[in-house]
Amino acid sequence: MTEAEIVSAGGVRSSRQSCNTVRILNEIETSLLECKVCFERFSVERVKGRPKNLPCGHVMCWECLRSLAHPRFQRLECPFCRRLCSPAEASDCLVVAHLTELLGGGRPPCAGYSAGGFGTVGLKLRGAFGGWGRLVNPTGAALFGGRGALVVVHDGRKRVGIFSLQGERLHGFGRKGTLPDDICYPLDVAVTPAGHIIVTDAGDRSVKVFTSAGRNLLTVRETFKLPWGTDADGSNRIFVTDADAGTLSRLVVDFCTNLVTGHHVASSKLCCPREIASSKLTGSVVVVEHLRGWEHRSSTATRLKLFDSQLRLLSQIDTFGFSLVAPVQMNVSAVAFDSEDNVIAADGSRRVVVCLGKLRESPSFIPLINQGLGRPVGLICTAGNMLVVLDSSEQAVKIYKDGRDQ
């Protein structure tokens, strides 16, 4: 074969490869990147165009999902396989979303984050207090909204400690025991806007309500198997996760009579739910599930579920979903909302704190703290762009400030 023939043959092969590439891209465009209900292209920039994955595995856009759902019963029959499901069971199809971004020149994966919260420049350590003796195996922390004080539960002589943000111990209460004012093994703590302190106690498997001075007002014991995480919203309603029962509950308490006037179990099919956070801005609630079973062989697999203010499931993201937006597998050990309703999460295994953006839109992965942590088990976002991290490994409270604020 002459040199001219070789060049000609190479040109033919190159042309054929180019044609094959174009054909494959066109097939991807037609088969994967458009909704098979309305035949519109998926979009990650428009909420209505986001690809949603049904429990049966079929994918459609958010607008078609909402249109096909029964307006009253919120039930949906998959148009492809006829399987019934709830729209709340649908999750973002991140594989298709990322293909749409890759082939369509969409926004980068982190664009779902609003810089009005902590920003993208990271956080700087501004102070710390605690240490062995002052704090012993701390498990939860909460903020007194109007007092500038921090409540920490731990295994010390007094289970509940109240500190100033400068680290001064103000007072404590809750000795280990079985009396009404005692606390056995606290797991988490929350503070209502009215100043009542809520503690989940694994010792007698109860939820206890105290005044700020430490007087027990109420103990709810019969309805829980293992109450774990707790938080309160702006209306003094109390949220509790039950790790053994797999439930998310909302308690309404009449603090004039110290009686429970409402107990609503919003979800009863969660998998070992533990950490929880309530948004002061929108009333949304995020819960961390710790997955187990043969399909999740890793002991560090976690899943986040986002509920609206009425505790209806909005979205979820699991370990596989994290792997599409994060360079590492996330093992979430604490969650919080910042002032812009972004979800902030701590990874207890990798000792980092990251911003996950707005989970209902497009999850992001923005590192905020990537050094100096032992095992973060509690997060508190303040209105002044401060992030309080409870580090159980170092028995300490660490306070970080936005790197833009000097």
Image (cartoon, rainbow, N blue to C red):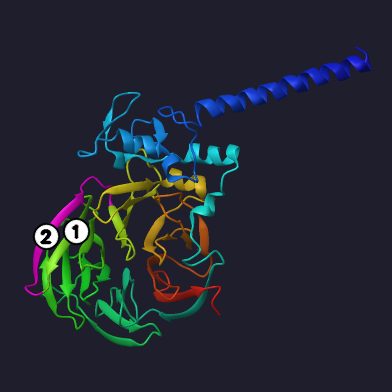
- Residue flagged by tag 2: what amino acid is it? Gly
Image height of 259 relative to 363, above or below: below
* Along the line of sight, the residue nearer the viewer: 169 or 147: 147
Q: Position of residue 201 (x, y in %)?
A: 20, 66
Residue 335 visible in this rendered orientation of the protein: yes
Q: Quadrant of the C terminus?
A: bottom right
Q: Which residue is mark 1?
A: 250
Q: Residue at x 32, y 59 (%)?
A: 275
Asked if residue 4 lies left or right of residue 185, the reply is right
Whether residue 67 is in magenta: the answer is: no
Q: Position of residue 262 (x, y in %)?
A: 11, 60
Query: Is 270 a magenta residue?
Result: yes
- 304 lies left or right of 206: right
Residue 52 sits above or below residue 110 on the image: above
Q: Position of residue 178 (x, y in %)?
A: 12, 72
Residue at 45 percent of width and 52 percent of height: 330
Q: Amino acid at mark 1?
A: Arg
Q: The magenta stretch spans which residues?
A: 256-272
Crowding at mark 2 (Cα within 10 Å: few <14, some 14-19, many 20+): few
Specify few, some or many for label 1: CA neighbours under 10 Å numbering under 14, 14-19, or 20 or more.
Answer: many
Q: CA distance from mark 2 to mark 1?
A: 8 Å
* SS under mark 1: strand
Which of the two discs, 2 and 1, labels the residue nearer the N terminus? 1
Labels 2 and 1 touching (C-beta < 8 A): yes
Residue for badge 2: 262
Q: Nearer the viewer, residue 80 or 364?
A: 80
Residue 118, position as x, y percentages in the image: 48, 67
Q: Check the image and report above or below for 158 versus 232.
A: below
